[in-house]
């Protein structure tokens, strides 16, 4: 099989028309061209579950150290200090450090607060005939939760959520490499650096304090504290990822459940199925459907030679629909039984905040369905969010 087999298949993560409904294109890629080549943007793409899963696990071959967002990828190894842009042994040391910020105790302790925020937000729209499920609820909930965990003062949380939104501003052909996104990144890093400096003097029970006090062992065996810039990099990763992906999960939930009213009714009648429904939503509509990797050696996949130092995009969104692993993968079924999906990644880069995201998704659906067992999405007013790595809804107005 050849990646250059004559075909009219075309896919790239910047094409908003394709991104609005990519699943037929991805199905054809899985069936006809599982190793896809895009010359315009100089990348290869894997669309089958088996290939995506394997590349996530084989970090020696598929490196994250050249960054994982297509428009940011390059031959130089990344020096931002962000864990998602690292390979072992650096990643191993820092993963252990960051994992301590998501301890089972800390996650369990936040559950009552998540439910409290859900009810506060739903109270604010109580009695209204319609509201925006993302802007009035789905985007605010995870922002408040992760802001509390990170240690952002509550009076500053909404302003910082808007800055994070600007991080994901995209422009044609250049994606997130633009002045608006860059300015937002600088603003957020400087803000977190300031908070970390404060935590060194006045520790609190939050993640920024944990980062301010953290120590790591360098390659030469020397134990040292994190530099402020390093700690801010970690804080930015936790803060932005914790804000953005759950917002996309909840927006997807509003649309998908309205598309499947029988499934929604099942969850209303049987709320114990909601945790499984969250997994099915993640499989069916992955909030982050594209992850980049850099080949560290020549590889041959399905008979196609991919040279060393190539960009490879792992289409987790496509992998979740692969009939080879998920029978009738394009069918949404809240009672589907599956071994695992790859929407949180897999292997060493499995999402460190997955347990928190699952909890937020579960509680959000529990509280929403208690109050609103039915709703209708106002499709003409719904607006998508498009980036090369995140996919979902920016606005989902619903009538209740």
Image (cartoon, rainbow, N blue to C red):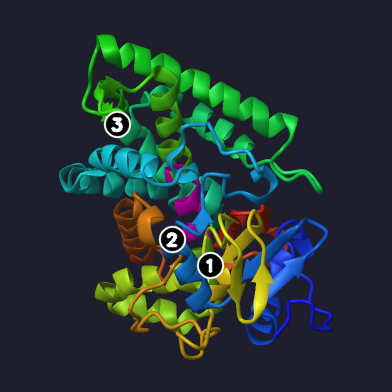
Q: Is residue 244 magenta?
A: yes
Q: Is residue 358 magenta?
A: no
Q: Quadrant of the N terminus?
A: bottom right
Which residue is labeled 2 in the image? Answer: 345
- The answer to the question of whether label 3 and label 1 lie on touching residues, with beta carbons closer than 8 A, is no
Closer to the chain start, of discs 3 and 2, is: 3
Residue 255 location, x and y as percent? 55, 68
Q: Nearer the viewer, mark 3 or mark 2?
A: 2
The residue closer to the viewer here, 193 or 304, is 304
- The answer to the question of whether label 2 and label 1 lie on touching residues, with beta carbons closer than 8 A, is yes
Which residue is labeled 1 in the image? Answer: 316
Mark-to-mark CA distance, 2 and 1: 8 Å
At 40% across and 39% down in the image, what residue appears?
A: 238
At 33% across and 79% down in the image, what residue appears?
A: 339
Image-based side of 376 in relation to 143, left or right: right
| Highlighted magenta segment, given as a residue range | 242-251
User: Up-down: is 7 above or below 219?
Assistant: below
Closer to the chain start, of discs 2 and 1, is: 1
In the image, farthest residue toward the left: 105
């Amino acid at each position: 099989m050849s990646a250059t087999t004559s075909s009219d298949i075309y896919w790239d993560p910047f094409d908003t028309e394709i991104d609005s409904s990519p699943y037929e294109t991805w199905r054809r890629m899985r069936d006809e061209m599982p190793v896809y080549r895009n010359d315009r943007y100089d990348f290869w793409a894997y669309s089958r579950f088996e290939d995506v899963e394997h590349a996530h696990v084989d970090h020696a071959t598929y490196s994250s150290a050249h960054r994982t967002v297509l428009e940011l990828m390059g031959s130089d190894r990344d020096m931002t200090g962000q864990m998602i842009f690292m390979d072992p042994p650096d990643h191993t040391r820092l993963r252990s450090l960051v994992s301590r910020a998501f301890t089972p105790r800390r996650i369990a302790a936040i559950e009552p607060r998540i439910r409290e925020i859900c009810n506060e937000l739903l109270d604010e729209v109580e009695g209204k005939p319609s509201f925006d499920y993302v802007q009035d609820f789905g985007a605010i909930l995870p922002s408040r939760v992760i802001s509390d965990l990170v240690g952002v003062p509550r009076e500053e949380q909404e302003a910082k959520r808007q800055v994070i939104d600007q991080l994901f501003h995209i422009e044609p052909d250049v994606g997130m490499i633009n002045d608006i996104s860059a300015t937002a990144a600088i603003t957020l890093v400087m803000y977190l650096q300031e908070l970390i400096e404060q935590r060194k003097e006045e520790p609190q029970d939050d993640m920024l304090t944990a980062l301010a006090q953290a120590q790591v062992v360098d390659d030469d065996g020397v134990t040292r504290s994190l530099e402020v810039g390093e700690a801010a990099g970690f804080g930015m990763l936790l803060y932005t990822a914790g804000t953005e992906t759950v917002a996309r999960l909840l927006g997807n939930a509003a649309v998908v459940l309205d598309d499947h009213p029988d499934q929604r009714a099942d969850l209303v009648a049987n709320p114990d199925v909601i945790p499984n429904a969250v997994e099915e939503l993640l499989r069916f509509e992955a909030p982050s459907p594209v992850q980049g990797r850099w080949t560290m050696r020549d590889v041959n996949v399905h008979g196609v030679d991919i040279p060393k130092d190539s960009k490879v995009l792992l289409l987790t969104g496509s992998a979740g629909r692969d009939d080879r692993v998920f029978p009738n993968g394009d069918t949404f079924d809240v009672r589907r039984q599956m071994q695992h999906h790859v929407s949180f990644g897999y292997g060493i880069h499995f999402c460190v905040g997955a347990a928190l995201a699952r909890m937020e998704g579960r509680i959000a659906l529990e509280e929403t369905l208690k109050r609103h067992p039915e709703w209708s999405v106002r499709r003409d007013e719904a607006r998508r969010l498009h980036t090369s790595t995140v996919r979902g809804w920016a606005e989902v107005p619903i009538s209740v």
